[in-house]
Image (cartoon, grey):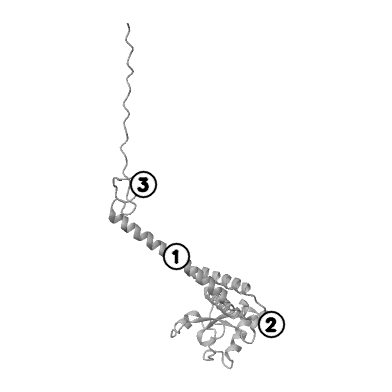
Amino acid sequence: MKMGLRTMQTPVRMKPTQQPKCSECRTKFAPRRPLQTVCSLDCAIKQARKMSEKKARALAKVERAAIKVRKEKLKTLSAWLSEAKTAVQQSRRLEELSKGRGCMSCGRSQAEVMAGDWRPGGYWDGGHFLGKGAYPELALEPKNIWLQCKSCNGGSGKYARKGLTVNQSFKSRLIEQEGQALVDWLEGPHEPKRYRIDDLRTIKNEHNAISNKLKGLK
């Protein structure tokens, strides 16, 4: 009677279980229960506090966004117009500064103006060639807004050309630099503007985007 040959099997070696890292302190630990992610009670408390703070920040962000929406719904057309004017003037000021231009009224360079005493709000403004009060249809027209030092935009004739007012100096240099055709167009008749809130919001956002881009180039 022949005996069957016993098949020899190679024992399977089990890989050691890799210990996970604590999600809080990042040290390795041996979990005591399934789905355990922290190594100790202290780490669990710290993580819970962080999660609570994160939820609070997220809630505050949502609340701020809701308040902003409510405020915008209550904002009047004149308020939107004021914000759009500020955005256009800022973008034009930054555009002209980025080109290295000086004051359109007195002709002083950026270095000359900034060598003087600092004024609240900085050294420069985006000044209207034709005033926004007398010419409201051109208040948001970029070609009507040019770089002016604070002194000239405030009406001081200290640096104006000899025998000329600030406005006359503005016009003279605008013709020299941009041409008579532009000045004729600006001074010509224009249709009254009837802006809607959506129009003003778009203008504000577009010019804020230009300003942010120019600020990033500094």
Q: Amino acid at mark 1?
A: Leu
Task: Say few, some or many: other residues with alpha carbon within 10 Å of mark 1 (under 14 / 14 to 19 / 20 or more).
Answer: few
Give me the residue at 33% from left, 22% from top.
9
Q: Earlier in the sequence, mark 1 or mark 3?
A: 3
The residue to which callout 1 is attached is: 59
Image height of 98 relative to 114, above or below:
above
The spot of residue 31 in percent (x, y) is 30, 45
Q: Earlier in the sequence, mark 1 or mark 2?
A: 1
The spot of residue 132 in percent (x, y) is 61, 84
User: Number of marks in the image?
Assistant: 3
The residue to which callout 3 is attached is: 35
The residue to which callout 2 is attached is: 184
Q: Secondary structure at mark 2?
A: helix
From mark 1 to mark 2, how far is it between C-alphas? Answer: 55 Å
Q: Secondary structure at mark 3?
A: loop
Give me the residue at 38% from left, 59% from top.
51
104 sits to left or right of 15: right
Mark 1 touching mark 3, by CB under 8 A? no
Q: Is residue 99 visible?
A: no
Q: Quadrant of the N terminus?
A: top left
Q: Earlier in the sequence, mark 3 or mark 2?
A: 3
Task: Say few, some or many: other residues with alpha carbon within 10 Å of mark 2 (under 14 / 14 to 19 / 20 or more).
Answer: few
The single residue placed furthest to the top in the displayed view is 1
Q: Amino acid at mark 2?
A: Asp
Q: Amino acid at mark 3?
A: Leu
The single residue placed furthest to the front in the displayed view is 33
Image height of 150 relative to 71, above or below:
below
- Badge nearest the viewer, 3 or 2: 3
The spot of residue 141 in percent (x, y) is 63, 78
Give me the residue at 38% from left, 63% from top.
53
- Badge nearest the viewer, 1 or 2: 1
Q: Secondary structure at mark 1?
A: helix
